[in-house]
Image (cartoon, helix red, strand yellow):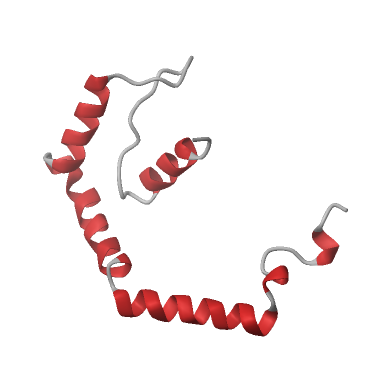
Amino acid sequence: MYDQGLNARWISEKRLGLEVPRDEMDGSFTGASVAKTSRTVIMEADGDIYRANTMKMKEVFANKKLSDRCIDSFTSYLKKNGGHNLLFSSSTLPY
């Protein structure tokens, strides 16, 4: 729930989709704003770049061989280096 705004901004930044405009006070949005944003991405010429970029991403994420190879590589790395060093070294921990 808390990362939806960050994810929406990241997707907008990467031009994979558009963020639905929200009310600045409470973060809500209207059905009309969802419909307009969806229509732009799905049907209008302004959405061409989003559809093209999404198709490129589909080639990566729908590729089972590539996905399996990435998972195998990641698990191999963890086995060799241990998962505890993946994100933090002991000197960066606050305790």
Q: Is residue 90 shown left or right of residue 63?
A: right
How many numbered marks does the figure carry? 0
Quadrant assignment, res 66:
bottom left
Quadrant assignment, res 70:
bottom left
Query: Farthest residue in the right direction?
Result: 95
Residue shown at 39% from the left, 23% from the top? 22
Quadrant assignment, res 69:
bottom left
Measured from the top left, where is residue 61 in percent x and y? 32, 66
> Is 74 placed above or below 54 here?
below
Residue shown at 40% from the left, 20% from the top? 28
Measured from the top left, where is residue 65 in percent x and y? 32, 80
Q: Is residue 28 shown left or right of residue 30?
A: right
> Is 74 placed above or below 90 here?
below
Residue shown at 85% from the left, 64% from the top? 91
> Is 90 placed above or below 65 here?
above
Measured from the top left, where is residue 39 in percent x and y? 16, 34
Query: Farthest residue in the top direction?
Result: 25
**Of 73 and 25, which appears nearest the observer?**
73
Measured from the top left, where is residue 5 in percent x and y? 46, 36
Residue shown at 41% from the left, 18% from the top? 23
